[in-house]
Image (spheres, grey):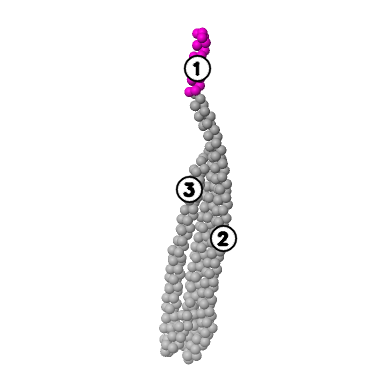
């Protein structure tokens, strides 16, 4: 073997040795590229599956929410119907009591006129009738005003509750829709399906907890109703006190003029008290 042949052989062996050292690296690099491509395909498939589930979940959640909202509206109508019936029943009782007294007052006043012998006594009887009539009218007006104010306040509280509920529901729908859109956008990107799923669950949980908190806050209407009831009772109590004072003053003047017993006074007092509720 010549010197040149030896040099060529040595160079060849060195090249083979170097290539043998580089070959695993090249193989691993090609394998890594293949794995990356496969991983990307798997990720894309996983994300596509997740997005399909997101779409399905959103559609089901909106349907379920619509069903719950419909049930809530049905219960709302039932409560409103019950309130209307309750008010109508109360108004009917009041109207009956007033009509009962109105039908008897002429007979009560006629008895007073029959007992009045002198012009002074007749004038006193007429003054008494006017005083009682005015007292009854004043009490009725006060009671009607108190009831109207209570009903207006109650209606305002109910409407306020409905407005707040609608706002809470709208905010929840917006949050759910935003979470869905964010998840869909992430599905087309480089994010892992697991991370997309975790982020979506966190967003939905936050939206659900806020809705629950908002609805719980609506229960404060009970406290406001207590104040409305208290205000109505105060007005009625004052109206009753004013009515009794007016009747007492009228009876005192009538007694002085007629110098009569208490039979007529007692009958009149009982009827006027029950007639003006």
Q: Residue 28 location, x and y as percent?
A: 50, 29
Is residue 112 within the magenta segment?
Answer: no
Foreground label between 3 and 1: 1
Determine if residue 231 is in view.
no
Mark 3, other Cα within 10 Å: few <14 / some 14–19 / many ≥20:
few
Question: How many numbered marks, from 0 up?
Answer: 3
Foreground label between 2 and 1: 1
User: Which residue is painted at 43% across and 68% down in the image?
Assistant: 230
How far, Cα to Cα, is label 3 from label 2? Answer: 27 Å
Seen in the picture, residue 86 relative to 7 is either above or below; the reply is below
* Nearest the eye: 49 or 7: 7
Q: Which residues are magenta?
A: 1-21
Mark 1, other Cα within 10 Å: few <14 / some 14–19 / many ≥20:
few
Q: Are marks 3 and 1 in contact (CB under 8 Å)?
A: no
Q: Residue 93 location, x and y as percent?
A: 52, 77
Residue wearing tag 2: 70
Residue wearing tag 1: 13
Q: Residue 95 location, x and y as percent?
A: 53, 77
User: Which residue is painted at 56% across and 45% down in the image?
Assistant: 49
Seen in the picture, residue 31 relative to 62 is either above or below; the reply is above
Seen in the picture, residue 4 relative to 217 is either above or below; the reply is above
| Quadrant of the rendered image containing residue 63 | bottom right
Check residue 267 in the rendering and tell me which mark sits there, or answer none: none
Seen in the picture, residue 44 relative to 27 is either above or below; the reply is below
* Nearest the eye: 6 or 108: 6
How far, Cα to Cα, is label 2 from label 1? Answer: 85 Å
Query: SS for tag 1?
Result: helix
Foreground label between 3 and 2: 3
Q: Are marks 3 and 2 in contact (CB under 8 Å)?
A: no
| Quadrant of the rendered image containing residue 235 | bottom left
Q: Looking at the image, is mark 3 or mark 2 earlier in the sequence?
A: 2
Residue wearing tag 3: 202
């Amino acid at each position: 073997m010549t010197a040149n042949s030896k040099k060529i052989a040595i160079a060849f062996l060195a090249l083979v040795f170097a290539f043998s050292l580089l070959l695993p690296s090249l193989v691993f690099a090609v394998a890594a590229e293949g794995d990356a491509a496969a991983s990307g395909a798997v990720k894309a498939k996983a994300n596509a599956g997740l997005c399909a589930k997101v779409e399905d979940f959103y559609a089901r959640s909106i349907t379920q929410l619509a069903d719950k909202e419909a049930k809530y509206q049905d219960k709302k109508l039932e409560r409103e119907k019950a309130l209307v019936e309750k008010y109508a029943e109360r108004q009917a009782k009041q109207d009956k009591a007033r009509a009962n007294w109105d039908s008897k007052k002429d007979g009560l006043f006629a008895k007073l006129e029959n007992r009045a012998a002198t012009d002074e006594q007749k004038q006193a009887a007429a003054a008494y009738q006017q005083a009682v009539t005015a007292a009854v009218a004043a009490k009725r007006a006060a009671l009607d005003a108190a009831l109207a104010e209570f009903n207006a306040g109650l209606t305002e509280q109910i409407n306020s509750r409905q407005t707040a509920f609608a706002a809470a529901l709208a905010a929840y729908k917006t949050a759910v829709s935003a979470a869905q859109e964010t998840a869909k956008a992430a599905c087309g990107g480089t994010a892992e399906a697991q991370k997309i799923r975790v982020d979506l669950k966190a967003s939905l949980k936050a939206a659900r907890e806020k809705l629950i908190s908002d609805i719980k806050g609506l229960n404060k209407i009970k406290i406001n109703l207590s104040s409305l009831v208290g205000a109505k009772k105060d007005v009625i109590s004052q109206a009753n006190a004013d009515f009794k004072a007016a009747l007492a003053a009228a009876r005192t003047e009538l007694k002085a003029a007629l110098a009569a017993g208490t039979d007529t006074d007692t009958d009149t007092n009982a009827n006027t008290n029950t007639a003006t509720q």
